[in-house]
Image: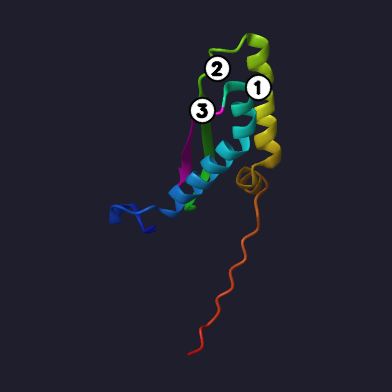
Amino acid sequence: MSIGPAEAGAVFTPGELLKIALAGCTGMTSDFALSRRLGADVSVVVRVSSDSHPEDDRYTDLHEELVVDLSGLDDAARTRLLTVVRRAVEEHCTIANTLTHGAGVHLTVVEETP
């Protein structure tokens, strides 16, 4: 996998990798509840977009969209499933929890010795 700035072309930016990690974590965390109620072959797409603050060089908000066909469920079953999915992600998605609670970042530069 190649990582670089957007202008480099066919590379992932660090920001894209962050969004991929969030989408992957949400997808994996919600998979059990969704597949249990909708079948093992349920199609799920997780999209992540962002708002940024260019002067501070950071994202201000990340927006997730979990796309799944719930048309086979009645209103009560749909409400229960959405509650279970939201609770699972809020309690068990490590990436979302890390971002939500603001993990500290501690950089140590270690000089390599020949």
Which is nearer the N-term, disc 3 or disc 2?
3
Residue beneath disc 2: 70
Q: Is residue 35 above or below residue 71?
A: below
Q: Is residue 109 above or below residue 113?
A: above
**For the N terminus, which image quadrant?**
bottom left
What range of the chain is rendered magenta?
40-53
Amino acid, disc 3: Asp
**Callouts 2 and 1 close, C-beta under 8 Å:** yes
Which is nearer the N-term, disc 2 or disc 1?
2
Residue 50 lies within the magenta run: yes
Residue 1 lies within the magenta run: no
Q: Nearer the viewer, mark 3 or mark 2?
A: 3
| Disc 3 to disc 2, C-alpha distance | 13 Å
**Number of residues whose C-alpha sits closer than 10 Å to that of mark 2, classed few (under 14), some (14–19) or many (20 or more):** some
Label of residue 81 in the image: 1
Residue 2: image quadrant is bottom left
| Disc 3 to disc 1, C-alpha distance | 17 Å
Quick check: 88 left or right of 42? Answer: right
The residue at 71%/39% (across/down) is 91
Q: Position of residue 83 (x, y in %)?
A: 68, 24
Label of residue 41 in the image: 3
